[in-house]
Image (spheres, helix red, strand yellow):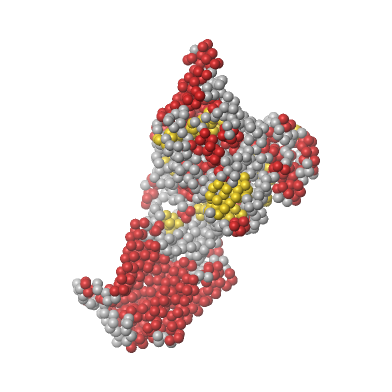
Amino acid sequence: MMQKEISRRRFLQGSVALTVIGSSAMCKTDFIYPKEKQKSRIPESITTKTTTQKAEEIPFLCGICVNKCAGFARVEDGVVTKLNPNPYFPKSRNMLCARGNAGIQTTYDPDRLKYPLIRIGKRGDGKYKRVSWEEAYNAILHGTDKFKGLIQILEEEKDNRSTIAYCNGEGLSKEGFEVLMGEEIGTVNYVDEVSICLETTLGGYFATIGTYGEADLSNADYLIIAGANRAEAIITPDTMDLFKRSKGRGLKTIVLDPRFTNTAAKADRWYAVNPGTDLAFVLALTYVALSEELYDKAFIEKYGVGFEEYKNHIISHKYTPEWAENITSIPAKEIIKTSREFMSAQSPIYYQGRRSVFSKNDFQLRRAMAIFQGLSGNLNKKGGIIYGEPLKLPEEEINTPIYNQAQGRFDKHNIAILSQRAGSWMVFRDMVVEKKSPYPVRAMFMRKHNPIAGVPNSAKTIQFLKQMDLNVMIDILPSDSMMFADVVLPEASYLERTSPVASYGLLEPAIVQRKAAIKPLYETKTPEQIYKELAEVLSKPLFEISKKYDNELQEEIKNRGEKNVYKEDGYILSDAWEKDVEERNRERVVKAFGEDAWKILEEKGVYYPNIEKYHKQINANEYQYYPENKKKYSVDTEDIKLVFNFKHLATKGVDPMPTWKDEYIFSVPEGKFRLITGRHAQFTQSATTNNMMLRDLIDTNYLWINRRVADKKGIKFGDMLEVKSKVGKVTIKAYPTEKIAPSQVFMVHGFGGLSQDMTMAYGNGANDATLLEDIHEPVYGAAVMNETNVEIRKV
Amino acid sequence: MNLNKIIPYKKMSLKELLTPDNKLMALIAVVLTALFFIGVINVLVHGHEIYNVTKDHPWGLLIAMYIFFVVSSTGLCIVGSFGDVFDFKVFAPSSKRAILGSIVTILSGFAVIAFEIGHPVRMMIYNVLTPGLTSAIWWMGTLYGLYLTFMIIEFIFLMREDMKNAKIFGLIGLLVGLAAHSNLGAVFGFLNTRLVSNGVFYPTYFILTAFITGIYLTFLMYGYYYRGKSFPENINNMLVNFAKIQGLLIAILIFFEAWKMLTGYYGGVPGRADVITHILSGNTFWLGEFMCGMFIPFIVILFSKGKATKLMVPASLIGMVGIFFMRYDLVHDTQLMPMQNFMTRVYQEMPGFVEYFPSNTEMMIGFGAIGLCLVLYYLGTKLFDLTSTCHAD
Amino acid sequence: MARYGMALDYKNCINCKACEVACKEENGVLLGADKHRIWVGVNELEGEWPNIALSSSVFMPSQCQHCDNAPCQEVCPTNATYYDENHVVRVDVDKCILCSYCVEACPYGARYEDPRTVTMDKCTFCSDTRLARGETTTACQNTCPTKVRTFGDLDDPNSEISQLLRNREHFSLKANLGTKPKLFYLM
């Protein structure tokens, strides 16, 4: 089909060069990107109407949240004019959400960090000096009159590399930062988003069924989704699969949420569960299933570990529906009905959830959920929780030094299990702030992470950052946390960089590559380039320090000569980035899948074996990625298990079987409200609040308050409220609604920016982290988000 | 060519022309005109953004004032035609003055609408090149253009005392004017989706209220001309007759309105009954439209049997205030019901009745045009002899 | 030529507003709540917490209905609003005088003023962007996570939309006004 646009004079010019394509919904004119022609330009207007002229369509991977959707960036004359979904990626299935579409505005955000900066004022006052990259690196090394450099800090700490800490948010370049900080520079002190996100969920599921798995929602017929809001916290392909089939269309959906969310709006039944009491609900579901013997006996026979003990545990504790009704406020008969329906369904799923830790019992809750799922036997099969088979990319070997002076992790105060890689943000921070760490932590390297907005109790995070001798921030936008950095390194946005290839998916696995749509704007650099350059600058001077304090290194040098040791033992820290990302991607993909795979990946942004044979368009909206018989519904894996009684946990002081404790009951004093927090489909990260397009959809965050309560207090829509907790206070507009319980209030996360340089986000709305008390759960030390009471006052 | 041969006018010096005989009135006219031009400059500099009209309420005060002026014009045309078209001798004295009035009011209306629509020049071009024949606005605009032409020709013949031709063009002008005016009513009447306006009411109501407006304005013109003096016998006689007609017309209007409200309210049809309830709970209807526009003048007429011609002058001024509210309300009430009757933003209350209040610039242009009208009328009365009564025979 | 229409599986809609953003980015629409070509409408919920009526919670994705008998076209004094060769209701910016009569006449609130051109603007079914390039989907359809929209030729009996409309019950908005919308809501 070819169309000419002739009715509007101003488009005549553009219609000369028309693009003709076949049946595919996309317009791909030029996949092989002519590198030498590549140029970047800032568009004149906020939105740019796409033209009919020839344009480049570059495959990219969205980075506005953590989910990773694939798309094609339409580039016209050096400007990204439109982001379109990529129909080849089985995970995101030809879709981009509102945030994904608005990603253009992040790249062209006028508030972006454009040049390296060095702090010249006080921490937090936003006074910075523009410097060259070289000056910025040197400042990290040598410091200025305002802050100390790494050399001085490490000298003073006698080469204890762990005096440097670092944090990083989720992303494709995160691993590189971990290599730089953890392996090359050599610190153990690492915190990331996991301990303020899904740590207990991952832990609970792995401990119980050996995987977090993938919920096959396109084939399930019964779904309990509790504490997960897939209509507003979009995760692919779950969101698409779920809502296409919900509300009486094949997937009976039971939603548990204290709020009436958009997910609840699509439910067949919504239970306004008392926050933090899901565990009681699941235990009661289990009680019904066990006492009525509704479970899959054959499955338990084969995979179950400690079933009889668990059964006795549940029955003897009398976790009856009537017992749970009092705690959860879900009627007993509804619990009985739900359990029976679940167990009699062909393919029932109790959705695992993700960002969790709503209450202190979260780990046990996830265990109980996984067990309940296991009781149905609906694991490793179509319509159930899938173990699947990810595509594997070859690992890369890097040569890293051993630092004998580096000391170990200490963030284990009051927690049972220390996670392997990153520790508990909250425990780590609090121990440093409260001087409980065995050695001083003096430098913080931050990348793509805004702990002031993300970690409960912002005041403490600020105190933590102020306490450091050196703070370095690598980011795209001047976040709240950036305001406390001494050296700021501006990173290219995800549309301006090629990222390391990644593998996604278990049921329909694929390899995906983000390619740079345009060259980095301003003086920004890609993360890998920054890692490399920083490593180059640090190598020699840091080696000199190690030489001074590390006896074993001195020994080695004596034996083998300094040059050899320096080279062979990995002290050239930039080794890992010798080849650029493009080249490494090519090598890895070719090694694993061959030359053709690389060509397909370059062109389509996505590759999986037989993609050309398997991938078909079904209709205008839907694609087949794998034929039905090639999907990894059931795999032969030793991971499959169902651990009812995890005895080893007892040795760590953790209940080996999910147990309800009265201390889990959270009370809201008269006149106060329980603060709950969450997401909207338009805002997830604190950075999105500076996105013009998204701000256009929601101007600020509001405090949900029950309409009847608001009426009594004389609070109307849009009234300003002061919200106060033990640790902080904010002001925020009121949104009276029946979607929330009279004893609770809710605000969407991410607003209330402190950074004056984020002009749209600054002072707009309220930051939930300012109010949230720093409570962590006992297993991993993960932050508990929904156990803060607040008082409100009209101002 | 001698202009005086085309249309006889009084020769006078510029100084004479610019020497008003009533300083207060002159001041009012000049201030209002100045406001009009300030408003015009404002909108030329800032664009339409400076108006308080919105996506949900795209028509505001300027449309109301345009209607106000063109209704006045049509009304004066009807009044004027009594003497020169229909040969009612008792009304003959009013013809020249009324036709002049109809010309200056419609010119003022055009001045307002020129700054209401986005592209007046483009309008003139494409009205001709690609006429939208199914559009009431096209018919209304085109017919008003013709109407103005005929009114001017009629006025010329009146000035020339050529009553035969005046009568012909007066009749054509009247018919075209009535057609134009009922089409203006149809602009609202055709709106199928706006239940409160849709239907036969506005096209007929517009003619009725035009007539009423014409009589109010006639009282004002004569009241002003004979200020501080008593009316001459023939004028007084004419005004008494106008007052009696006015009494009848207002009675009919009250009857019309009552039934419009009742039929609108009856049955509780959403989008109509709720709008009627909203209208009836507002001051602009009861105080503005009813008290000013109908009740007070009606009481004056009723209790004096139409003979209190002097008292009718202030009553007519109050009546014109009422007429303004009728125009304003008809525009506003038509748009009360939002077309997107749901929430489209995440944080929003359910949209209720659409709210609107004119911006300063809109008020400057809208009300300032009254000054423009007064200035034009003043120049007309200075330049032309409007007092001599002519008869067709 | 074609007669384009759109079928909306509106129960799939989760009110994420991806369509609205995709539309703005594709068509260079200005920001501002009153300048959207497409939107998702939400009704007031019925009931009090926790007894909210699930049945009252409906998301209605909508946009210009591209009526076959479009009131906005009928009232346009200069024929600036016209049906293009694909029966898409369009605005010729060179002819529009911004009298706003179309806004008054449109029962769907689908029109708004674009202050850059000082003329009326509205959904074009991406006629001058995507369709002009030969693509077969609109921006809103293509980006939708739950694939609410199906766009296509109503005159082609084999098109996906024709088949959908033959096989599934559907309704149109304010059909009683006789506007003959070409947006169809699937039940």
Q: Quick check: A243 left or right of A542? A: right
Residue B51 x/y as whole percent: 41, 60
Q: Residue at x 72, y 30 (%)?
A: A651
Counting the numbered discs, the total is: 0
Give the farthest residue toward the front: A435
> In the depicted view, which residue is nearer to us: A113 or C183?
A113
> In the depicted view, which residue is nearer to us: C123 or A3?
C123
Q: Residue at x 44, y 76 (%)?
A: B293
Q: Is residue B70 visible?
A: yes
Compared with residue A261, is residue A485 higher up or lower down, i.e. above or below? Answer: above
Residue A507 image-quadrant placement: top right
Give the farthest residue toward the top: A559
Q: Is residue A19 visible?
A: no
Q: Quick check: A347 left or right of A428? A: right
Compared with residue A55, is residue B297 higher up or lower down, i.e. above or below? Answer: below
> In the depicted view, which residue is nearer to us: B192 or A5?
B192
Residue A300 x/y as whole percent: 76, 36
Q: Quick check: C76 left or right of A654? A: left
Residue A142 x/y as whole percent: 44, 26
Compared with residue A491, is residue A48 higher up or lower down, i.e. above or below? Answer: below
Residue A118 image-quadrant placement: top left
Q: Residue at x 66, y 36 (%)?
A: A778
